[in-house]
Image (cartoon, grey):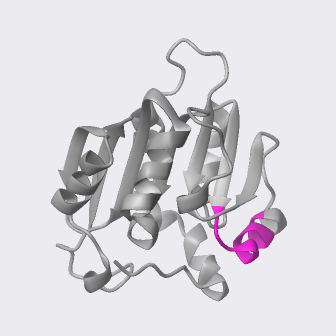
Amino acid sequence: MGFHTFDPESADKLEDESRYRYLSREELVSALDLGRGRSRDTIADLGSGTGFYTDDVAPFAGDVRAVDLQDAMHELYREKGVPENVELVTADVEDLPFGDGELDAAFSTMTFHEFASEGALAEVARVLEDGARFVVADWTANGDGESGPPVTERYDRDEAVELLEDAGFEVLRGDERPETFFVIAMA
C-alpha cells in the first residue's frame, strides 16, 4: 500500500497511551500465546518504532527483537530506555537477519500497511517456527481516517487475511473494528 515509514520527528505520537483504545497490552500479550511449554520465548516486533508495544510485551518474553527500518527510531528508543531483554535490529521486513524458525512469535502494531508484500510476508513465515503466531493490528481501509495513515494506504481485514493466507499462514481470528483490524495468524 503506502510502503512509507513513520516520520521520526513525530515519534512523540507513538508514546501516546490513547493508542491502547485500538489495541490493549493485555489483548496483544494474550494473542501472542507466549509460553507453549518453553521457558524463554524469542519474539519480534516488526516496525517497533520507539518501543511502545515492545515494552509491554518484553516482561512476558525471553528475548525480544525490536525491528525497525529506521536507525532514528532506535535512537529515540535508546533515549527512552530499552529493557534488558530487547535487542534493537535495524532491518527491512523483507530481509530479516534471523534463521529459519528462529522466532516463537512476531507482531506488528499499526505498521502492516508499511511493509505488507508477498516478499515480506514470506520472510516473516520463514523466521517463525511452525505453529508460531503472527499478530497484526493495523489501521483499516474501512476506517474514516481520523487517525493513522490515509485510508488509501491501508488494507482492510479481508485483504490482510488474504495476504497472510497466500503467504502460508493459517488465520485463527480476524476482526474488523471501527478504525482498525486485528488478525491472529499461525505459521
**How would you classify the magenta stretch by its main secondary structure?**
helix
Foreground residue, 55 or 47?
47
Q: Residue at 60% x, 65% y: name it.
A: 92
Relative height, residue 158 to residue 65 (above, below): below
Foreground residue, 19 or 82?
82
User: In the drawing, does residue 135 fall left or right of residue 104?
Assistant: left
Q: Position of residue 109 (x, y in %)?
A: 46, 58
User: In the drawing, does residue 68 fall left or right of residue 182?
Assistant: right
Foreground residue, 149 or 131?
131
Relative height, residue 76 to residue 174 (above, below): below
User: In the drawing, does residue 178 fall left or right of residue 129?
Assistant: left
Q: Magenta segment, which residues? A: 68-77
Q: Is residue 70 magenta?
A: yes
Q: Residue at 62% x, 28% y: name it.
A: 41
The answer to whether residue 177 of the structure is visible from this angle is no
Based on the displayed image, in which of its 4 quarters is residue 159 positioned?
bottom left
Q: Position of residue 183 (x, y in %)?
A: 29, 48
User: In the drawing, does residue 155 fall left or right of residue 49?
Assistant: left
Q: Position of residue 40 (x, y in %)?
A: 67, 23
Q: Is residue 91 magenta?
A: no
Q: Quadrant of the C terminus?
A: top left
Q: Residue at 54% x, 20% y: name it.
A: 35
